[in-house]
Amino acid sequence: MSGVRLHLLRVGACRHLACMAARGDAWSVIDFPALCGLIHHPSRGWLLYDTGYASHFMDATASWPERLYRTVLPVHLPPSEVLATQLAALGLSASDVSHLVLSHFHGDHVAGLKDFPAAALYALGADVEQIQGMAGHRWRAAAAGMLPGLLPADFGQRLTRVDTLSRRALPGWMAPLAEGFDLFGDGSVLGVPLPGHSAGQLGLFLPDVDGRPVLLAGDACWSLPALREGRLPAWPTLAVTHDRRRYRETFEGLRRLVNREPALSLLPSHCTPAWEAYRDGR
Ligand SMILES: [Zn+2]
């Protein structure tokens, strides 16, 4: 047993048509929760995978063109879901989170970055370059769901590009995913690129969480039931995908993996059924 533990936290949600995330789903508006993984490592302490929404998101989207983002995807963050409140309920504060892994730089994944001023930051170089390339292009950035103002001033100093870390082979049964970047050098937390949704997009493979393997999959898919059935997002969603060909390749690889390996808990960042099934031990 690795001793790694995982808490899934819902940190706000946006509302959008279900059918945009998965073809064949209803033409009705549903919540897409912003789920974060709070991971405890026995010697490295607390690691957070993404931050979900935060008050900084409202500030960063208060005026145009950034307001476009929250106009298209209306956000709500009830007080009980604020990340600091949920950490406090676990007896933690922001300073207890020493590692913050960013799946990619869409605003709903990084809005709380400034609330963790002491955490070491981890992201894929391709994603860092993608958001840094948006500097000075406010409309383009807003249309792509990126808000460079959410990054803290010392972002570069605290950042480790995960793709510079040592590589480790994944278990053969994880094919077509073959290798990951070893965050702590002990194989317990492995960064796995799941490209297409963004330039890099970093998933996290935890081989052993209370005896079961978990893949935190970011936005490689939005709905686990739809992934199992091979139902891609609708075309307007694919139209704003960074690289549609690579997205389809990643999606198809995960579809085969999740249908072949029922012991694996694959957890997309915005899928309520996957979250509930994991919480309930199914
Ligand atoms: Zn995203």
Image (cartoon, helix red, strand yellow):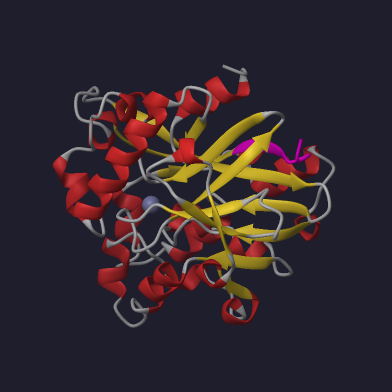
Q: Compared with residue 11, is residue 276 higher up or lower down, i.e. above or below? A: above
Q: At 19% across and 53% down in the image, what residue appears?
A: 245
- Please say whether residue 31 is visible from this viewpoint: yes
Given residues 137 and 24, the one toward you in this image is 24
Q: At 45% across and 72% down in the image, what residue appears?
A: 125
Q: How many marks?
A: 0
Magenta segment: 1-9
Position of residue 110 in the picture relative to residue 48 (left or right): left
Q: Position of residue 270 (x, y in %)?
A: 44, 37
Given residues 70 and 36, the one toward you in this image is 36
Q: Compared with residue 155, is residue 150 higher up or lower down, i.e. above or below? A: above
Given residues 242 and 265, the one toward you in this image is 265
Check the image and name the residue furthest to the front: 172
In the picture, the quarter occupied by the N terminus is top right
Q: Position of residue 158 (x, y in %)?
A: 65, 76
In the picture, the quarter occupied by the C terminus is top right
Q: Is residue 182 magenta?
A: no
Q: Is residue 8 magenta?
A: yes
Position of residue 140 in the picture relative to residue 121 (left or right): left
- Please say whether residue 268 is visible from this viewpoint: no
Q: At 55% across and 66% down in the image, what residue appears?
A: 162
Q: Compared with residue 54, is residue 275 higher up or lower down, i.e. above or below? A: above
Given residues 129 and 95, the one toward you in this image is 129
Q: Position of residue 131 (x, y in %)?
A: 39, 72
